Amino acid sequence: MTWTFVFALAATAYAFKVLGLVLVGDRRLPSVLDRCLALIPAALIAAIVVKDTFSIGQHLQFDARAAGVAAAAVAAWRKAPLIAVIVIGATLTAALRAAT
Amino acid sequence: MKPWRDERLRPVLAACVTLGFAVGVFAVSFGVTSVSAGASVGQTCAMSLLVFTGASQFAAVSVFGAGGSAASAFGGAALLAARNSVYGLAMAPHLRGSLGRRLVAAQLTIDESTAMAAAQEDESHRVAAFWITGLSVYLFWNVGTLIGALLGSAIDPKVLGLDAAFPAAFLAILWPLLRERRSAMAALIGASVCLVLIPFVPVGIPILCAAVGILVGVPSPSVAAPVGFEVQS
């Protein structure tokens, strides 16, 4: 790895991060855009949840994580605090891995 | 008001510490992977300080570690970093203020900060949650990276089940949003699109494509309600 690579990747990553903020900036948006942009976190975070639970790279994989995240979902549904949800998800996954 | 004095931000602070710990362990593992892939300690720490996008950094050093070219390392890492621009679109209406402040906010625009901000109902809490989460993850990620780069050996995050900690955390953060019908539909479409595409397109693209879920926001809400007073079902 070279320093050129590090700085090029840093510049690219920052450009992506700043792009959305600059594109919208201080503008007041039409309400249809406002409504759509407000749904971005729901759509993308849901995608991250399924990706992190059911895949490794480009492969779909059903393993201990699915059970851990399912237990976490029940905890979230029962309105458990976020810490408890995280601990339940991680602990069950680790326990299943240790047992198999 | 100081955030820790505000009752409703306490869960955010508590979540930051827990998420921070998980992020920190992953960062140690990143530091180790990066150094063993041939990067110097300085380069490894510079990546975490400047790139600050975990998935991209891991992707880049994994390609180098496997003997891949700089071009393929760069391509994969850039694809994974692209989703932060979509988060920027979502966060822009909430991150007004001076240019300097927004340029700093840009560096902290990642999965965790965007999710935690979206989960808050109150506008001031939204902004506070973004900054608290972003700064906390930044701190833990960089300290963890330094430790990993110097020590050269780490606990495997998988042994602790920490790879399941992130989807579990994001699911819990997302949960309250799903009570609103259109958010629930956007989430369902986003998750389905992502799952279907994973085997067929390079890593990073399925999450970008999940953004089609936001199109459920196009039709005007059937019940005319003033902004900020959405009818909860």
Image: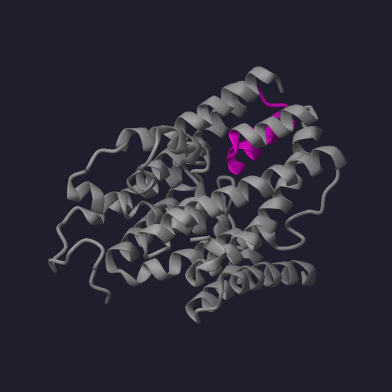
Asked where in the image residue B124 lies, by quadrant, the reply is bottom left
- Identify whether A57 is placed above or below A61: above
Report the quarter where the C terminus of chain A lies. bottom right
Q: Which residues are magenta?
A: B51-69
Q: Is residue B190 above or below residue A70?
A: above
The residue closer to the viewer here, A55 or A95, is: A95
Q: Is residue B197 above or below residue B82?
A: below
Q: Choose top left, top right, bottom left or bottom right for residue B117.
A: bottom left
Q: Residue placed at 51% from the left, 75% from the top?
A: A76
Q: How many marks?
A: 0
The reply to whether residue B27 is in sight is: yes
Residue at 38%, 37% (x, y): give it: A21
Residue B4 location, quadrant: bottom right
Q: Position of residue B164 (x, y in %)?
A: 63, 62
The residue at 24%/54% (across/down) is: A35
Examine the structure image and report whether residue B162 is included in the region drawn in magenta. no
Q: Is residue B115 visible?
A: no
The N terminus of chain A appears in which quarter of the rendering?
top right
